[in-house]
Amino acid sequence: MAQQDILIVMQADLERALKKPAGQRRWAMLIDTRKCVGCHACTIGCISEHKLPPGVVYRPVIDQMSGVYPDVKRKFIPRPCFQCENPSCVSVCPVGATKKEADGIVSINYETCIGCRSCVANCPYGARTFDRGVDYTEDTPQKQPYEAATFYEYDKAWKRENHRSAVVGSARKCHFCTSRLTKGLLPVCVTTCIGRATYFGDLKDEQSLLVQTLKKGKPYRFKEETGNDPQVYYL
Amino acid sequence: MKTVRTLLLLLFVAGIAAAFGKAFLWGESVTKYGAYVPWGLWIGIYIALVGAAAGSVVWGAWLSPQNGDGKGTEIGSALLAAALCLAFGLAFVGIDLGKPLQGFRIFLHPSFASPLAWASWLYGLFFVCVAGYFLTAMKRPLLLLAAVVAIGFTVAEALFFGQMVSRPLWNSWLTTLLFLTAAASAGAALLLLVWQGTGLTVDSAAVAKLRKALAASLIAYAIVEGIDVAMALSGSPEKVLAVKRMIASYGFWLLYGVIGTLIPLFLLLRTERTLLAAGLSLVGAVGSKYAFVRYGFVPEPLPGLAKSFQDAALQTRYFPSMVEWVVAVGLLAGLVWVILWAVEKILMPKAAQ
């Protein structure tokens, strides 16, 4: 019998996790760099989903080369927000605009963020960017409709119409597609991954594909010495 | 002098215009900081001015016993210069905010888990102390309270930077000592500049004392900076990279090391060069804090990140934009102009009474 697509498996895991109270689940991600081909579909999917402006990127793919010719290696490392257990970005915020949610997501309240960028400075992974209020069509005759279109983050609808929009001037980062999750949809970077390199699920669900894959492999995490306890694992 | 004042005022007006433009019209599109270098020139100047304000009031309190009741031109000028310096420092950070009009939230909805919230509240308390000093008869208690609060906000600010686990250059217990010694030297320099550059009549013994204090604090700051650099050079590769880039920068070795430390120490050997020495020390204070902020962002958070997505705001390179320079020069000129004005209109009439 043909093996089921892991998206179908993770979709079932997601539906199971959503039946639990938020405090009893822990969203996490596992990225198998051996399966990542560096197509950047996740980056583009994310930009499209959240209508990201210039200077804001939630999930870039780092192209790393190592070794000395002829013994060289090339590795692609997609880098979402690591939704750390002890996020150093949260404690530095002077207005409490960013916090660790019950389900493990580190959120930003665009309405209370003052744009001081303390959190941007203190993310060990460079996962936070800053919405400068610029558009891709800057200095062109007409702003394109997609730049003013509604997008959904943290279960709210947002628009970037002008400099007074709450999102403009705020720190921005990946949030594992919170608004998709609550609708029972997997994060867009997971569904667009052509190599099926990104696993997503509830770390507290022993039956989930995420936990099973973590157990089978030898996962590692970046910069553990910072004490941030990131919730994104790599293989 | 009138021409200099007119020039300062013109620069100030240009600075205000550029600051308003950034805050209300152009937004962040006219700045060069971004995601991987989120702070730049304005934050460097802000830290330097806050340090100068704290140092000024602490030296004022230190000199106060010889005047007994906490009154006197020397102390009044220390508090006035400190308050103005702090106000302009906060103007820099206000303009730097992504949402300048939302800055008040830090006072209404603070998160005291962040040392920055503590620092902000202490800034507020400091202004209350200064206002109380000038408006009430409780001179000495308010002077001493202002000095304690000034040390408090300097420490809070130092902890804010020193606790940043993501920035190896700053993440050190020595950062607090760096901020305190920098504040001591910048404060002494600011006060000497006000005393000797505005025509105020001040006690010559106090000037002599403060000259020695400036020399001593410049040496202390240089020693702490030297230890910090030496320790950083034996740290992690990211820390070594950051500190090497910092000490090689003009802001550090030229502005701080030569112009802001060595030359002033030499000039302080001669009494008549005090004003110049103080001025150069302040230039050095700005240079060192700019280098501290800027080069803290040199190491990439993850190798290759800055090349992973192409955008001007996603680079580890940074050089201030024209608007950043105009605001910086304009507001610093404005600070000098306002101090001169305040000394003439507030302190001199009081001293004449």
Image (cartoon, grey):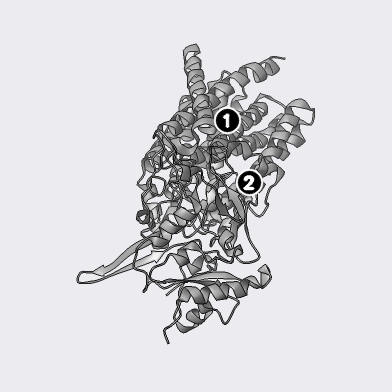
Secondary element under disc 2, as helix, strand or loop, is: loop
Instruction: Give the chain letter at badge 1.
Output: B
| For the residues bearing labels 2 and 1, Cβ distance under 8 angstroms | no
**A7 or B169: nearer the viewer:** A7
Relative to A123, say whether A29 is above or below.
Answer: below
Q: Quadrant of the C terminus of chain B?
A: top right
Image coords of residue A86 (percent x, y): 59, 65
Q: Residue at x 73, y 34 (%)?
A: B128
Left/right placement of residue A172 relative to residue A74 reads right
Q: Is residue A29 left or right of residue B342?
A: left
Q: Is residue B301 visible?
A: no
Can the viewer see residue A1 in this picture? yes
Which numbered tag is attached to residue B191? 1
Three-letter code for the amino acid on which mark 2 is drawn: Glu
> Residue at point 57% right, 82% down?
A207
Residue type at numbered disc 1: Leu
From the viewer's perspective, is residue B79 above or below residue A11?
Answer: above
Q: In this view, which residue lies farthest toward the front? A: A1
The picture places residue B26, in percent across and down from the top left corner, at 48, 32
Q: Residues within 10 Å of mark 2 (few under 14, many from 20)?
A: few
Q: CA distance from mark 2 to mark 1?
A: 41 Å
* Residue B224 rendering spot, x and y as whole percentages: 49, 50
Q: Chain of mark 2?
A: A
Which residue occupies the foreground of this view, B232 or B60? B232
Q: Classify mark 1: residues with Cα within 10 Å, few (<14), some (14-19) or many (20+).
A: many
Query: What residue did someone put label 2 on?
Result: A111
Q: Nearer the viewer, residue B301 or A48?
A: A48
Nearer the camera: disc 2 or disc 1: 2
Determine whether, in the image, residue A186 is placed left or right of residue B319: right
